[in-house]
Image: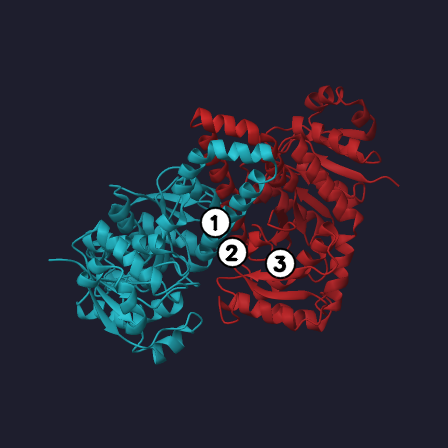
Chain colours: A cyan, B red
Amino acid sequence: MSLVIALDAMGGDNAPGIVIDGAAKALRQSPGLRFLLFGDEGRIAPLLERHPALAAAGELRHTGKAVAPDAKPSQALRQGRDSSMRLAIDAVKTGEAAAAVSAGNTGALMAMAKFVLKTLPGIDRPAIAALLPTRRAPVVMLDLGANVDCGPEHLFQFAVMGEVYARAVLDIAKPRVGILNVGTEEVKGDSVVRSAAALLRDSGLAIDYYGFVEGGDVSEGRVHVVVTDGFTGNVALKITEGTARLFSAALRQAFRSSWRARLGYLLARPALNRMRQRFDPRLYNGAMFLGLNGVVVKSHGGTDAVGFAAAISAAIQLVEQGTNERIIAEMNAAGTGRDSPAGRKVAAS
Amino acid sequence: MSLVIALDAMGGDNAPGIVIDGAAKALRQSPGLRFLLFGDEGRIAPLLERHPALAAAGELRHTGKAVAPDAKPSQALRQGRDSSMRLAIDAVKTGEAAAAVSAGNTGALMAMAKFVLKTLPGIDRPAIAALLPTRRAPVVMLDLGANVDCGPEHLFQFAVMGEVYARAVLDIAKPRVGILNVGTEEVKGDSVVRSAAALLRDSGLAIDYYGFVEGGDVSEGRVHVVVTDGFTGNVALKITEGTARLFSAALRQAFRSSWRARLGYLLARPALNRMRQRFDPRLYNGAMFLGLNGVVVKSHGGTDAVGFAAAISAAIQLVEQGTNERIIAEMNAAGTGRDSPAGRKVAAS
């Protein structure tokens, strides 16, 4: 049976162009795929003419409504019932599609996905997870902004979800999990991170809990999963991206500053291009909404077709690896399923 | 009258060598300076022989005790009364020195400085502030780790102190102040940042409050002062440093990956060296403990003489600019001095 992916064709700065081009690219990589394309027929149909294979593998479902990039989540929930974003999520709910991908408004996507799909048993709140480059293998970091206020039980749940996710997408048998803190000693930080560490140590789960990690440990690749609240995680992600941009801009400036530097750049260009590819943000595109009854992936709003195709690949991987089933199994093993007394105990601690 | 700086000669990975070399360097830059050098005479005296000018401008006060790099703050407070670190702070308290500089244990230095010097009127908690490079002028960020749990009134106080500090060291007449958050809209974030924003807007102070900034705005230099709690600030600082290290390592690797790339590096080297100087972490060395009745500067533990000299320069600037007097004046103007009813109201809100 071929995998069906629902696409919000109208989400993102350059939609629907990059969505259609990205889907066509993903189809070339995974020829068995099928797509449900939600959006404005008048704008999408002409784009499909350039991609006959996608036109054959995709079904276009028209809606004239789209969620505005600056819409508040509550507003999108109330007024966006016929929007391309909502219809893509609905298709996951009904089982028509195995996953939904959108490059639209993050807050609206999260609110709709939570409302329509609900959370997995044992998970109080979904989290946003993504991969970041490090000196070694990429690292999974979560939460990146879905939950600004977190209790210990939420960080614990993020750790379980992040570990499962790392096993699925990084192909690591036993990922090391760390909790982000201001120091590595057990006494450091606030009561939330210290209690979360205790929950992880005492969970009885076969999770390789490494301990606390500091901001500088993330890019060292000291652990495979970095757990944090959505406030710190969001700042950390955007600081990382900002620092990378600052460095890249300074490097470009340096190479343009003299004829010697220009010539040096020309000689080093192949090596520098390989380096650029390693850090290409498009290859890291696709933030997962972990903890939902269904797979939803958020693409960066400003990405291009290459980035959008990467987000589709990430969604496929989550589905094929049975990530959600694995999360449910882990939460059951931790005795924190919603119906277990231990679950209530942990959630109340 | 010449300025006297008290130095913890035993603090830091490469003490007392880098402290003495750094002090000699600072003395060449500011010939009027005088130093009180606290530490092990047997190790310091031989080093001074290489620096006759410093030996003449410095007074060596022997103590065999030093705070261990891994000592807990409480332990350092109890057992470190005769330590080189404590004696340097005591010299500020007694008025013998105008400022103290140490590259030792941060937690111990903060605990001792708070205990000995106490906070300024209107300031509940001191904060750690430092400069970070951006696309434009460097930005002041605080708190970088002194306070992991902060209320709105603390962020408000950090904003006032950061603004005064930016005026003093960046020579900007009216620095723009932003509060770090997960989005720029007023509704974003948790109640702490939203209440702090309200305190700043309603303070009646002549502070140019810009609003919320995101992680990516820091390196863009969108504001001159970035205010955050010590948890997020510490993670943000270390993530920035880690990302810069990751990028530098990848660049070095790229330039070594082929003979073409090596040759390209040789040609571009002068331009790349200028770029490196712009981001040289040693020039950003020296974290200020703002909000204390006295100037205390923390040098990075792993720095060298160039970095330690920069930390001394930062201390001099704080003293010469009358930073503490300006903070007191601002807090009085905000009606949040300890003795004012308004101050108690704000602190309790």
The crowd level at tag 1 (other Cα within 10 Å; few <14, some 14-19, many 20+) is many
- Cα separation, mark 2 vs mark 1, equals 8 Å
Discs 2 and 1 lie in a common subunit: no
Q: Amino acid at mark 3?
A: Val
- Cα separation, mark 2 vs mark 3, equals 12 Å
* Residue B223 disc label: 3
Q: Is residue A190 left or right of residue A58?
A: right
Secondary structure type for disc 3: loop
Residue B269 x/y as whole percent: 58, 30
Residue B306, placed above or below residue A112: above
Secondary structure type for disc 1: helix
Q: Is residue B329 left or right of residue A124?
A: right
Secondary structure type for disc 2: helix
Residue B76 x/y as whole percent: 60, 40
Q: Chain of mark 2?
A: B
Question: Does any portion of residue B175 appear in the rendered image?
Answer: yes
Residue B169 x/y as whole percent: 72, 50
Looking at this view, is B307 or A213 the one in front? B307
Q: Residue at x 17, y 62 (%)?
A: A56
- Cα separation, mark 3 vs mark 1, equals 18 Å
- Image quarter of the N terminus of chain B: top right
Q: Amino acid at mark 2?
A: Gly
* Residue A240 disc label: 1
Looking at this view, is A284 or A59 the one in front? A59
| Callout 2 touching callout 1 (CB < 8 Å) | yes
Q: What residue is shown with label 2?
A: B215
Q: Amino acid at mark 1?
A: Thr
